[in-house]
Image: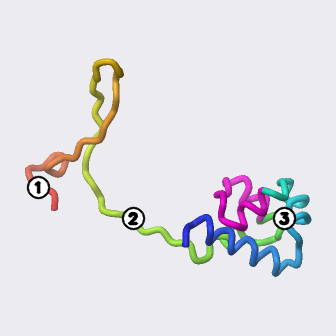
Amino acid sequence: MSVAQQFGDNLARIRKRADMSQEEISVRASLHRTEISHLERGLRLARADTIAKLAAALEVDPGDFFEGIEWKPGDMRIGRFVEEEVPGVGTVQHRVEVEHWPGSDTPKS
């Protein structure tokens, strides 16, 4: 399940537990009803100010919307961005992997 879908499920559950309609929560949170619908269906991600408005309107902790949402960092890749002139395009940036840890002759593993 995506972050947006889990957030939406949490929002819908919290809203129903508070016995409020999407229309009522939208008025209390100063948001459009369709935004509530889009959030609950996982079609959009809420901005920080929207989460604060929803939490205040539903009288819950903002963290309640994140129940079941986890993030695990991926593999660390050591590298840097370099600029390069490309004829006909101009200056572009691209990522370059490095073969050794910065400041060391030890190969990365």
Q: Which residue is mark 1?
A: 107
Q: Looking at the rendering, which quadrant does residue 59 occupy?
A: bottom right
SS at badge 1: loop
Q: Amino acid at mark 1?
A: Pro
Q: Are marks 2 and 1 in contact (CB under 8 Å)?
A: no
Q: Residue at (81%, 74%) from the top-left corner?
A: 15
Q: Looking at the rendering, which quadrant does residue 89 occupy?
A: top left
What is the CA distance from the residue labelled 3 to the residue labelled 1? 53 Å
Q: Amino acid at mark 3?
A: Ala
- Crowding around mark 2 (Cα neighbors within 10 Å: few <14, some 14 to 19, many 20+) is few
- Crowding around mark 1 (Cα neighbors within 10 Å: few <14, some 14 to 19, many 20+) is few
Q: Nearer the viewer, residue 33 or 27?
A: 33
Q: Residue at (73%, 71%) from the top-left corner?
A: 11
| Residue 45 in magenta stretch | yes
SS at badge 3: helix
Q: Residue furthest front?
A: 88
Name the disc covering residue 73, or none. Answer: 2
Q: Is residue 66 above or below residue 35?
A: below
Q: Which x, y percent locates residue 1?
A: 55, 73
Q: Which residue is mark 3?
A: 57
Q: Looking at the rendering, which quadrant does residue 19 occupy?
A: bottom right
Q: Residue furthest left?
A: 105
The secondary structure that dominates the magenta segment is helix
Q: Residue at (55%, 68%) from the top-left corner?
A: 2
Q: Is residue 69 above or below residue 109?
A: below
What is the CA distance from the residue labelled 2 to the residue labelled 1? 22 Å
What is the CA distance from the residue labelled 3 to the residue labelled 2? 33 Å
Q: Amino acid at mark 2?
A: Pro
Earlier sequence position, callout 3 versus callout 1: 3
Q: Are marks 3 and 1 in contact (CB under 8 Å)?
A: no
